Amino acid sequence: MFMREWNTASSLVVKSGLAALLVTGVSGCQVDVGGQTLPSPYYLQDDLHYAPAGPEFKLSREAAAMKAYEASFEAESP
């Protein structure tokens, strides 16, 4: 009788584990494992969004303003 109860309990545990695994696999959400955010299983089928390429030097306006300021300062001094 003990063996029958153990088989029923282990069967329930195995079925519950498989159901949890199936729900997790089908949901397709991101997971956090060991501090890493892993993508959903459908990331390869997702459409990509690209941002246009910007300037290589991020501070080009500031550099131009500083150069203009230095040029005006040198033009004023004799």
Image (spheres, grey):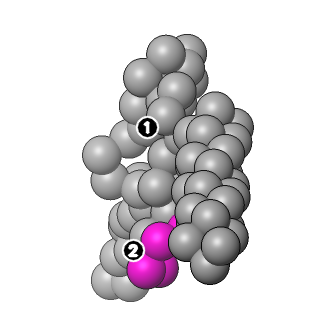
Q: Position of residue 55 (x, y in %)?
A: 38, 41
Tell me if I can see residue 65 in this picture.
no
Residue at horizontal 47 percent and vertical 71 percent from the top: 33
Residue at horizontal 32 percent and vertical 53 percent from the top: 57
Question: Which residues are the magenta region?
Answer: 31-35
Q: Which of 64 and 16 is in front in this view?
A: 16
Task: Judge from the rendering whether residue 64 lies leftward or rightward of residue 22; answer left or right.
Answer: left
Please state which of the two labelled residues, at mark 2 or mark 1, is closer to the viewer: 1
Q: Position of residue 22 (x, y in %)?
A: 61, 40
Task: Judge from the rendering whether residue 6 lies leftward or rightward of residue 44; answer left or right.
Answer: right
Q: Which residue is denoted by mark 1 in the rendering?
A: 54
Determine whether 22 is above or below 48 in the image: below
Find out whether residue 60 is within the magenta segment: no
For marks 2 and 1, the one nearer the N-term is 1
Q: Which of 55 and 36 is in front in this view?
A: 36
Tell me if I can see residue 15 in this picture.
yes
Which of the 4 image quarters holds residue 76?
bottom left
Residue at horizontal 65 percent and vertical 73 percent from the top: 1
